[in-house]
Amino acid sequence: MSADAGVNLELLLNLDDVEDAARTAMPRVVYNYVAGGAADEITVRWNRERFSDYRLRQRVLRDLSALDCSTTLLGRRMPLPLLLAPTAGHCFTHPRGELATAEAAGAMGVTFGLSSGTHTSIEDVMKVAKAPIWYQLYVVKDRGVTRDLVERVQAAGAEAICVTVDSPLDGARYRQQRLPMALPPGVTYPHLAGSREPSSIQTLDTVIPANLTWKDVEWLRSICRVPLLLKGVMSGEDAAQGIGSGADGIMVSNHGGRCLDTLPSTIEVLPEVVAAVAGKVPVIVDGGVRRGTDIVKALALGAAAVQIGRPYVYGLAIGGAAGVEHVIRILRKELLMAMCLLGCAKISDIDHRVLWDRKA
Ligand SMILES: Cc1cc2nc3c(=O)[nH]c(=O)nc-3n(C[C@H](O)[C@H](O)[C@H](O)COP(=O)(O)O)c2cc1C
């Protein structure tokens, strides 16, 4: 299969291969925007590295004749415990932007979290969507604007809303600031008119007035007809308070290390959040997930599903919809391989017992 950037996807065996190909194919400014993180990018590195602290515990000779990696999340059956995390600005990466991403997600039956910083309106995305679309919300100072947006995305068919709570501002993204990006001609932010411009550097003056607090979570819960998830929770206390404020799901995320550097990796924080949530709502984790074994480890530590951000954006860059699909296929195949080799025939077989000694 040959993709738009002239890359033979079949030769890209894992997500590192995909990133390498994307680094070569993408303009440097765009690659830096996607790959970069906050400050010294230590959290970006930890997100990836900490997965290898966990070793796996193999069981043999189990019946794997009905191997199946499908699962249920918030009442919806999914082919695998994976979602595409909301990432802003897909037209920086590919001319078809979010349309291509939505087509790939639909082809694989995977839920796609549409960012508030989308370059394509949710109404247009819904025209091509064949799998659930979730909407990622940034709350802005004018709550009337936020209310209208919530109404609009629900009317368009968003099946869940995840409000991002970890980034009142972008953080010290030096790599991005040194090489700022320009919007491609004709490309806009159709959901951000008059609110937040993700391509500009947010200053304290522009964001503090938004002053998102727990009261807003309760308010959002009262105006949402669909499940409301909190994205960017990094402590058990906040997770418990989120549930108390009405959240239907918790996303453990440090924004892919793009906001506050030296936050711990998400896989380290996950057990604390899972303990605080105590099974009341699903916990989803993102940050550094690059292997099927990473998915297994996250589930073993109590996550209901994982999300990926950068990897599918790299897939989009090198192959449009086919590239995104390829990334999902790689993870699906690796997950099934890992399950098979661990002796887990189904997702519910994956629990703490697949971790050897829990932590290395
Ligand atoms: C290019 C890019 C843009 C992003 N834009 C958003 C966004 O608009 N809203 C949001 O909540 N998270 C955003 N994120 C964070 C992702 O949702 C997710 O938390 C993160 O990418 C997961 O880490 P990973 O890239 O290591 O998989 C963005 C991430 C990237 C890489």
Image: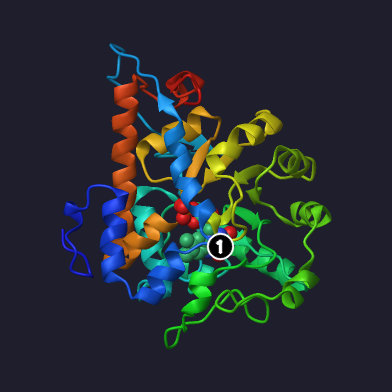
Judge by depth and name the residue closer to the eye, 174 or 112. Answer: 174
Task: Return the x and y of residue 201 as percentages of the image width and height.
Answer: 61, 77
Q: From the viewer's perspective, tell me whether residue 123 is left or right of residue 280.
A: left
Q: From the viewer's perspective, tell me whether residue 183 is left or right of residue 170.
A: left
Residue at (30%, 51%) from the top-left corner? 16
Task: Return the x and y of residue 176 as percentages of the image width and height.
Answer: 50, 73
Quarter-wise, where is residue 349 in the image? top left
Coloring basis for residues: rainbow
Q: Which residue is mark 1?
A: 38
Judge by depth and name the residue closer to the eye, 27 or 342. Answer: 27
Task: Return the x and y of residue 252 as percentages of the image width and height.
Answer: 60, 45
- Outermost residue, front side: 40
Residue 112 appearing in the image? no
- Outermost residue, bottom side: 185
Q: Secondary structure at mark 1?
A: loop
Task: Return the x and y of residue 249 as percentages of the image width and height.
Answer: 64, 42
Judge by depth and name the residue closer to the eye, 264 or 210. Answer: 264
Judge by depth and name the residue closer to the eye, 262 or 207. Answer: 262
Which quadrant of the rendered structure holds the N terminus? bottom left
Residue at (53%, 76%) from the top-left corner? 177
Task: Check mark 1 vs ligand 1: CB closer than 8 Å? yes or no.
Answer: no
Residue at (37%, 21%) from the top-left corner? 344
